[in-house]
Structures are given as structure tokens and as C-alpha cells.
Amino acid sequence: MRDLIVQWLTELTQPFWQSSLSMDQFVTALQETFNMVFFALIFGGIWGFIQGIILLVTRPEGILPNKFIYHLLNPIVNALRSLPFIILLIAVIPLTKFLVGTSIGTWAAIVPLTIYVGPYMGRLIETSLLEVNEGIIESAQAMGATPWQIISRFILPEARSSLILNLTTATISLIGATAMAGAVGAGGIGDLAISYGYQRFDTSVVILTVIILLLLVQIVQTLGNWLSKIR
């Protein structure tokens, strides 16, 4: 499969491709980008869902109000969201080295990417869940549903479309962050854009990188819009 993709890209770009970068290198970088997005989205999504649900249920008007937990978690989420990714990337280098043994490469980038996207997704998930009509929650409570049943059987199904659209937005932001991670040797197509496009003044690489990123964003957004409409 990989060889077919390399061959197809080589044939497609051959008429105008004037670069020392091979299509094999480009496909490898694309795989690294997919790995970073996939694993950071999985880990960040789990963390984000936990944060979003805790913020929802512990808020003063929530189904399990807890001022201590809410006022402890809320500023932490805000603080992590306020950090520019490039600064976060550098700030967590000691943690990255502790967890994966290195601060360079694709797997090292997954740590700051997860820390970056987790709070972002948590706030988006909280926003989606808050859009659920309070009457539905009151009806569930009147029927004697437990807090977990209210969340799993009433709130989450009602917020499904909004959740998918917000997760789509988070995924697109994550794709942009993986490109930025290339500035510190994280690999991926962002690294190619910097190493070949910027430092070697290779316009062809920059153009191809931009086109690929645009296509990825369009595919993710279209898929998210389609999934949000399915009932």
C-alpha cells in the first residue's frame, strides 16, 4: 500500500516537482503526522471527556455540585488552554523525556500534543453538554435516574451532534499543532516544511505541504459534518 502511494504521488508530481525531497520521505512524514494526530486525539479525547463531564456535573447548578472540585479544575483547564502550543512544547520537555525517554521525534511530540488538546477538548465538550435542554435533565431526575444514567442515557445522546462538530474543530486544531511541532524536530509534514521548504528555500515542498494540510482539514470537516447529521 505504501509503495503504491509513493508511486502514485511520484507520477502525479513528476511534471512540476523540482526538489531534493523524495516522495518516499514525504509519505513517511505524512504517516508521522497521522500517528501524532491519532494518538494525541485518543489520549486527549479521553482526558477531555473526563474534564468536560466533571466540569458539567460539579458546577454550582450541576447534578452533583461540588465547589471545591469545580473551582480547582476550572482554572487548570483555563491555564493550560491559555498557553501557546510552541511554549507548551518547550515547557513540558522534562515530562516528555521522563515518559518516552526523548524530547525529539514523533512519539515525543504526542505528550505535549495531548496536554495541548485535552483541555481544549474538555472545554468544547463541556460547552456541548451545556447545550442540552434542562427539561430533559429534570425529566430524567423525576424518573429516578442516577447521575451516571443521566449523563450516559440522556445528556450524551442529546449532545451527540454538537459533540461531533466540536471534536471535529479540535481535530483540525490538532492537525495545525502537529505542523507546528515540526519546529522542534517532531517529524511530520511540518518538519519537512521547515527543514526543506524554509531552511533550503524549497518552494515546491512548501506548496505541497500547504495543499496536503488543506486537503486534510477539508476531509476532516466534511466527515465531521456528515457524521453529525446521522441519527
Image: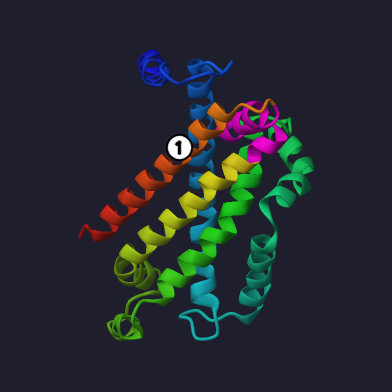
Which residue: 48% across, 55% down?
A: 170
Query: Which element is circle 1 on?
Result: helix
Left or right of 92 on screen, residue 216: left
Picture quadrant of residue 190? top right
Q: Quadrant of the N terminus?
A: top left
Give the total of numbered labels: 1
Indicate whether 52 appears above or below 175.
below
Instruction: Name the residue carrying label 1.
Output: 211
Q: Which residues are magenta?
A: 181-199
Which residue: 30% across, 70% down?
A: 158
Q: Give 148 or 138, whichever is nearer the viewer.
A: 138
Badge 1 crowding class, 10 Å Cα cut-off, few under 14, some 14 to 19, many 20 or more, is few
Position of residue 37 measured from the top left corner of the image (x, y, whole percent): 51, 41
Q: Identify the main secondary structure in magenta.
A: helix
Q: How is the image coloured?
A: rainbow
Q: Give 222 or 50, whichever is nearer the viewer.
A: 222
Indicate whether 67 appears above or below 3.
below
Q: Give 12 or 34, whichever is nearer the viewer.
A: 12
Q: Find out whether residue 80 is within the magenta segment.
A: no
Q: Give 130 or 216, whichever is nearer the viewer.
A: 216
Position of residue 23 measured from the top left corner of the image (x, y, whole percent): 48, 18
Q: Quadrant of the C terminus?
A: bottom left
* Amino acid residing under circle 1: Ile
Position of residue 54 measured from the top left corner of the image (x, y, whole percent): 53, 69
